[in-house]
Amino acid sequence: MKKVAIIGAGLSGLTAAWQLQQAGIAVVVVEAKATAGGRIKTVTGKRGTPMEMGATWFGPQHVYLQQCMQALQLQRFQQWQGGYALVEAQGVQELYTMPPHSEPYFRIAGGTGTLIKALVAAVGEQHIHYQTPIRQITHQPQGITLTTRQGTTYTADAVILALPPQLAAHQIQFTPPLPSLLWQVMLQTQTWMNGSIKFAVEYATPFWKNEQPISSIFSDKGPAVEVYDHTDVTGQYVALKGFLSPAAQQLTDMQRKDAVIQQLVQYFGAPAANYLSYTDAIWWDEYIGCNAEQLRLSPHQNNGHPLYAQSYYQQQLWWAGAETAGHYGGYMDGAVEAGYRAANALLAGSLHAKMADKPV
């Protein structure tokens, strides 16, 4: 095994590339977008506040992610869950005391994007080709050929698909065709976060931690249906962050911002109107559109399907990506686990092939 091409520079693809490089395998990572990260997207506010538009939290059970962070010397910190939860239901607002020993959730110090930056540095920018969407994968006797939308080709001994399976099914032509059962599973695999709208509002001070501290809000009215404290690890940079209802997609950028600020003012009064910045991200714009086919799929449907743990094209095509993980499919921990799994399986297959080639 001399060279492996990895499609997708998200958390899973970068993890796989890093593992293969450590084993002495040359890699090239091709990414359709202009930046790495996939569904990890940390934006910076006017004061330098890191705010997550994508993957944010993890728990103590997410061991693969934390092993990766430890190897990259990244630190975690605990999400503040103290004080009260404000629940708005049928026009009535009530405060509920947060349980003192609730399950901890963590965030990455400096923002989740620091994980991607560390992996990009470990892999090397020179090995990542941005704005390189792949439209065709061809299996030939001498290896795998990738063809971009612009007509450029890459050749490799093996390929790791580190992108949502449904995205691959819609955007890549496979020659020869993949097995029909796998193809049907790909089309019916829910892409996690597709349909989500995340937002964050940056402030100068965490006024929600004052007299009756509120760490989370849940509303059946919206447009913000979930709101959480988003103070950074230093405590110097603060924001409120959460999710908007799907109906908010129909509003303009300005309408969404005004509606969210008005809602926060109803909860907290005048201080909520003195925001520094507002940002949001509509994730069905990022992944194949909010079509009827995607909306019919249940959350995590077919995530971790056994067919994604198998190899194809005579052990030359492997799956990674968060949706293919055997545990915690769709989450950051699943993305790391799938990257490790694909790299290790590919290396094991290569080792067995070398041993088989040796004369008896």
Image (spheres, helix red, strand yellow):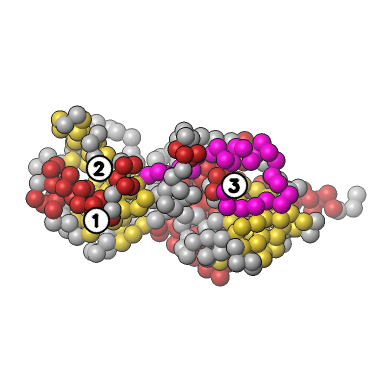
Quadrant in which residue 31 is drawn = bottom right
- Looking at the rendered image, the disc whose residue lies closer to the viewer, 1 or 2, is 1
Tag 1 and tag 2, C-beta contact below 8 Å: no
Q: CA distance from mark 1 to mark 3?
A: 35 Å
Residue 318 against residue 301 in the figure, above or below: below
Query: What's the residue type where badge 3 is placed?
Result: Ala
Compared with residue 192, is residue 232 higher up or lower down, i.e. above or below? Answer: below
Q: Secondary structure at mark 1?
A: helix
- Circle 3 sits on which residue? 169
Instruction: Give the side of residue 161 with respect to residue 218, left or right.
Output: right
Q: Which residue is mark 2?
A: 223
Q: Was residue 21 drawn as part of the magenta stretch in this picture?
A: no
For disc 3, the neighbor class at 10 Å (few under 14, some 14 to 19, many from 20) is some
Specify the segment rendered in magenta: 169-196
Q: Position of residue 158 (x, y in %)?
A: 69, 55
Horizontal arrangement in the rendering, residue 32 relative to residue 101 (left or right):
right
Q: Which residue is mark 1?
A: 254
Q: Nearer the viewer, residue 194 or 44?
A: 194
Question: Neighbour class for label 2 at 10 Å: few (<14), some, many (≥20)?
Answer: many
Looking at the image, is mark 3 or mark 2 earlier in the sequence? 3
Circle 3: element type: helix
Secondary structure beneath disc 2?
A: loop
x, y percentage for residue 36?
A: 48, 60
The residue under the point 23% across, 52% down is 255
The reply to whether callout 1 and callout 3 are in contact (CB within 8 Å) is no
Q: CA distance from mark 1 to mark 2?
A: 13 Å
